[in-house]
Image (cartoon, rainbow, N blue to C red):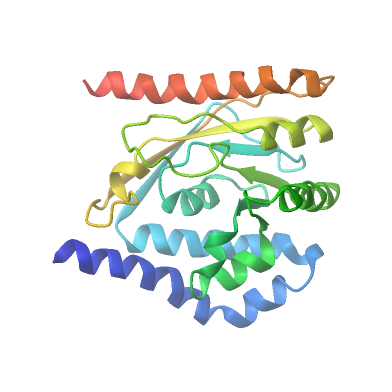
Amino acid sequence: MLILLWRIWFYILMGVPILIMFPLLLLFSSREEWYPQFFVVARFWAKIVLYGCGFIPKLTKEAEPDRKKSYMFVANHTSMTDIMLMLYSVKNPFVFVGKKELAKIPVFGFFYKRTCILVDRNSQRSRREVFDRAQARLRKGVSICIFPEGGVPDDESVVLDVFKDGAFRLAIDHQIPVVPLVFFDNKKRFSYTFFSGSPGIMRAHICKEITTQGLTQEHKKELKEITHSIILKTLETNLRNKV
């Protein structure tokens, strides 16, 4: 019973602050040049949700992303809280590229649709449009965030699923560095299995950037494999240290 109430509380915390800040969010999401201001409010919202649910973020970094540069931020994907922890961890204004289904979530979905780049993975046209919209955002100096697994694996025993190409194709096209992030505890804290999870520490780790300078699309597979290897090895090292 307590876990059910706690889960319901999570969704309340997702929605109520958005309703309270609705005029401000509506204003800042009305023009693309005001997106950095929207991003500041979104980071504040993420902290409300995390701390309000008893999650305690712990961030470590191998390097600090340059606030004046654009990046392709990528991370393992195991939980809805990945969105909040990514917002908490990264100070560079970025736009999520994510599945269109999240736009159906009441309240949250309204601004998700207005500010994020939505993709219908069953539509080739939608995937092409993602690249056009991402290019427009990158030209304005905003970074991009993609969870390259393309979704949360149904099998929760999977440590890290196969990566899709999109993030790495974009990074090479725009010659922006790829920055891998690793989320260690989100699956344990708040998985998609409804009657599971608990408050506690949520660790995130920012890895060193991977340069794409001089790379072409012929290097896409190699870049994808390097990024996957960095995240997987970091996750596996964490698992071994727990044993």
The spot of residue 100 in percent (x, y) is 59, 59
Is 72 situated left or right of 206 in this image? right
Q: How many marks?
A: 0
Which quadrant would residue 8 be assigned to in this image? bottom left
Is 242 situated left or right of 232 in this image? left
Q: Looking at the image, which residue is at 25% across and 65% down?
A: 6
* 101, 181: nearer the viewer: 101
In the picture as drawn, the residue positioned furthest to the left comes out as 1
Is 223 situated left or right of 141 in this image? left
Which quadrant would residue 214 be assigned to in this image? top right
The spot of residue 155 in percent (x, y) is 34, 37
* 7, 39: nearer the viewer: 7
Above or below, comparing residue 229 to residue 133 in the picture: above
Q: Looking at the image, which residue is at 23% across and 52% down?
A: 196
- Quadrant in which the N terminus appears: bottom left
Is 191 situated left or right of 165 in this image? left
The spot of residue 160 in percent (x, y) is 44, 30
The spot of residue 215 in percent (x, y) is 81, 20
Q: Looking at the image, which residue is at 51% across and 75% down?
A: 107
Above or below, comparing residue 88 to residue 104 in the picture: above
- Quadrant in which the C terminus appears: top left
Q: Looking at the image, which residue is at 34% across and 65% down?
A: 10
* 214, 17: nearer the viewer: 214
